[in-house]
Amino acid sequence: MVAPFMLKFHMTFSLDSLPSSQVNRVRSFPHIEGNYALHVYIPVHIPSATRKELASFLKKVTTLVPTLHAVDVDVSLSGMLKDEALLEKVVLGREFHISLGRTAPLRVHQINSVVSMLCQKLQFQRRYLIDFNKWEIFVNDDSTRTFMSLEVVAGGLAQIRKQIQAVNEVYKLHNLPEYDPRPHISVAWALGDISDTLKRMVEEEMKKYTERSGSQQKCIFTSKFSGILCKIGNKMHKICKFQEE
């Protein structure tokens, strides 16, 4: 059963927890001929039963912080305030990502080796549930963007950390930057460091929701682990298979 939208919020400014893959796909490294962007991640879809509640919440926050945009699609949330169904579809109805490694530049001669090692280390995985427990505010390393994200702090966290450790081992062998994250998906972003403003606005809206509904749920939504993908340039590689329980 999908849990209703819960109202718990914390804040951090650590961009070790926010890989370049989550920074609206803006790479933190220059393009060099022969390099391909590598991104290893768990695909996530927000359950339809949760989207309406989240869309309503995002609408209220956007009314107060009109500079918010949808992550990846670069669409202004303020332009969809009059159509909550459109907001729900465009912002919440797409695929999100829990990054298992930083987006990093990969040379052509490294591609087969990286994919092979990732498959070897992550070949068999058991299905598990991922709980997104709280809103988190992140700011990227150069303070050019602020993000509203949903973080995993309980269910599924141990499994994701093991998967990140395996990816880090492969990265290390290929002289790629390792990753020490707090697993999450980013939903919306705004230019600059507006963390104080966004934190205050979100807290105010969450307080109103709590007073109105009396709800103190422990989880915003739950997603089933559906596999691991590795994107290199424009090519996608499926990394794991599932073990039978």
Image (tube, rainbow, N blue to C red):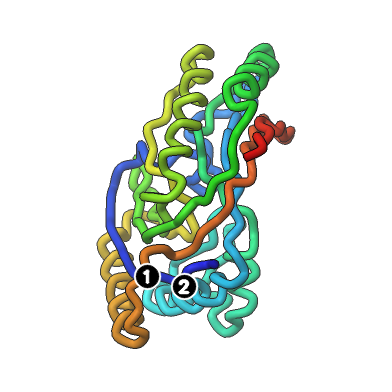
**Cα gap from disc 2 to disc 1, whole angstroms:** 7 Å
Q: Residue at x 72, y 35 (%)?
A: 236
Position above or below: 175 against 81: above
Determine contact: label 2, label 1, CB under 8 Å. yes
Q: Residue at x 50, y 12 (%)?
A: 173
The quadrant the N terminus occupies is bottom right
Q: Secondary structure at mark 2?
A: loop
- Which tag, 2 or 1, sits closer to the chain's start? 2
The quadrant the C terminus occupies is top right
Q: Could you say where residue 158 lies in the image, as x and y percent from the top left? A: 41, 39
Q: Could you say where residue 105 lies in the image, as x and y percent from the top left? A: 56, 24
Identity, as a three-letter code, of the amino acid under mark 1: Gln
Instruction: Give the labeled residue for mark 2.
Output: 4
Instruction: Give the labeled residue for mark 1.
Output: 217
Identity, as a three-letter code, of the amino acid under mark 2: Pro
Q: Residue at x 29, y 64 (%)?
A: 199
Residue toward you, 218 or 172 = 218
